Amino acid sequence: MRRQLLGGVAIALALAAAVWYVTAPSRSAPSGGLQVAVHGQAAGGGGWTRYLITVEDLADGTFDGDVLLTEPGSAGASPTSVTLSLPFVAARLPVAPVTAGPSAYRVHLTVPSRTSRTFTILAPDTFTTVEAVAQGQVLDAEAVQRASAVQVAVLSAQDGPADAIAGLRFGGVGTRVDAYGSARDLPADPLLLAGYATIVVDDFDSTALSPAQVRALRDFVGLGGSLVLAGGPDWRRTLGPLPPALLAVRPQATARLGLEPVAVLAGTSPPAAAVPALIGRLAPGARPILLETDGTPLMAELDHGAGRVIELAFDPEGAGAYRQLAWSQALAQSLDPPAAGNTPPATAIPGPIPQLALLLAPPTAPVPPPGLVAAVVLLYVLLVGPINYLVLYRRFHRPLLTWAAVPAASLVFVGLFSLAGLTLQAAVQDRAMQIVKAGPDGAEVVLEYDRVSFLRRGDHRILATGSGLAAPLTLDAYQATASACPTCATELGGLPAGSENVLPAPRPAIEENGIIYGSQRVVATVGAGRAEPALQANLESTNGRVRGTVHNPGRQPVVRLTLFNRDGRSGALQEARLGDLAPGGGISANAAWAAVGAQTGSTTAVEQLLRSVALSELGGRAGSVLVGLTLPRPGLVALDGSSPSRPSLAVLEQPVTVAAADPPTHFERTRLASSRPSGSGLLDTYDVWVPSTSAPLVVEPGSLTGVEVYDWSRGAFVPLQGEPLGPGEVHDGLVRVRGQEARLSWGSGLLVAPASG
């Protein structure tokens, strides 16, 4: 009886200990006194969004944990379970989720008690939540606050320029400014400038910039960004050290210039003012935007690669009543009309598009060579058949051993096949392709898509081979294919929530944890560098055909070269197939324009790829781009410490300008020149750049009312008469139109077209 009582007490104690162990708080949980608050902000648009994240430690105790920037998962991302009917118990076994779960950017951070830390993450614009996690416990989670704002970087030793630009608005769109007060703060890598629509330099000692920082600014512009430069009396310190390729006006001296053209452009009447300004000659290819009465440029524009430079001869900070007007006009000229919505995107560094990665065929698990399989099967048949009979039965007269020899041989050969499978499938399988965007002076940015199939369970690591940016695309790729490709959706499944993490760093890594056999992941990495010279194109459009020359000064061939053009007003995309370019060779173009998709017959995979790349570059804005196939650059990632990836193909894209067009329809470029509140709406001025043409031009104002056109010979706006424009109303291809509108349209309905008849 005593033994039974002791046994019962022991069982009760064991049960109590088990209950306490299960219900007691985790010993690894952080102290209950630790209080952390996180905040995330995102503004702007384009391929890479700048997320500004702040972590505050509100109480005693140091926060030592991870900050996660996550994207929303899908409804089926949580693990499910299946009930099994066993003889004595109903067991529920976990099953991998059917869909891919959310991905995250993870940063390890230490924040001392009652302090805060702020940092920036460059990521696609799909991420919505920021979390603070310590020892597996979520201490705080908040939604990312998004603002419709233009991202601007300001390099200035004074606070005035950043304050003035931060107060600008374009219709319902404001600005968000990052101020760089010294050279040591400015990144020396153009990739780290991704997300900015414009960089402004004013009252800044440019001699303090390192050669790498100057090159980063130059590459940022050449690859598609905008740069606003302010002159004034200190132009030697601010503009003198910059490379001539970034100067629309080559400074020579200082003089006092009047600012009345700034007021005329905006339709206001501030008091007359004259300020010290630089004077000089226009750089080759530069275009004046604001002119003094004697023709001295107050503001000029210069294309550099895919981007442009806006140079002010004066410093708006010394312009008194003209200060906000001047900054507003300079920044407006630097922005492209938005592709959609209200916010002009940042265009310098291309962002990842999951649909492009899915043009790659999914990796397949390798199989043994057929000859090896046949040889092993033949050997097995010979061993269990004739050899077994001749050795055991005829020679040793032990027929009973055949009952043991046959199963033993089967086990040996099963082991051989298993060993061959493990050897062949010991590593991941990767299909990769690259998009190479070429800029001037050999600058290029490479965007690599990797579609990876994991043939081994467990944790894996994808590491960039150099400095760059990385993005997880698995969830977006799954959502893009779930309805159209059930097989692809199944292969992309099996990803538990939060197990795909990007570790942002100069050399980023992507951790894939909890992988099941056969799971596929889609990731993108981008790197910048210097390579071969860009293509040299001199093209014009005449009566529906593209004519001109394209020269390839590099050592890589470019095949299937195609020119794409998008009309910013209608959104129509047209293409002209130019041919193949040998290394060091050229072609004389004479090809017909055709609307994309108008050709008869089925679209090939190459045509689909080239069109997708062109659409990703042009978005919804006007412009032209050359696209063709070329040889891949070295791989940008290494999988599980193996050798770098080996992309199977690469697509070259290079924005170009069609120098002349007759008629110019589809080739105009419209920019906002000025916008200010007026009455119940806005008084907006637009600049329309028209390629050289012999046709007389008329203005179709769209939604503008009370329309005026600028007469360059008079230096004043005159009412639009509805007749073909006179010689004084077109200045080196520039037509300036002003009118009232209820809200900022970014000139979407404005058109300068050939006169009918």
Image (tube, helix red, strand yellow):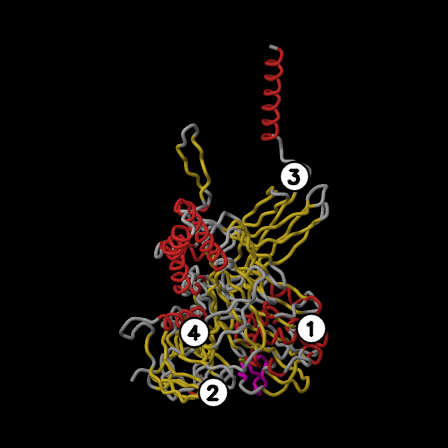
Image x and y of residue 146, in percent = 53, 55
Name the element at disc 4: loop
Name the element at disc 1: loop
- N-terminal of the pair, mark 1 or mark 3, is 3
- N-terminal of the pair, mark 3 or mark 2, is 3
Say which residue label 2 marks. 551
Q: Residue furthest left?
A: 600
Left or right of 364 on screen, residue 151: right
- N-terminal of the pair, mark 1 or mark 4, is 1
The residue range painted magenta reads 286-300
Q: Is the residue under label 2 in contact with that under label 3 (CB below 8 Å)?
A: no
Q: Residues within 10 Å of mark 3 (few under 14, many from 20)?
A: few
Q: Residue at x 40, y 62 (%)?
A: 375
Q: Residue furthest top?
A: 1
Say which residue label 3 marks. 28
Magenta: main secondary structure equals: strand
Q: Is residue 188 above or below residue 285?
A: above
Q: Is the residue under label 1 in contact with that under label 2 (CB below 8 Å)?
A: no
- N-terminal of the pair, mark 2 or mark 1, is 1
- Comparing 661 with 347, the one in front is 347
> How far separated are the C-alphas under marks 4 and 3?
57 Å
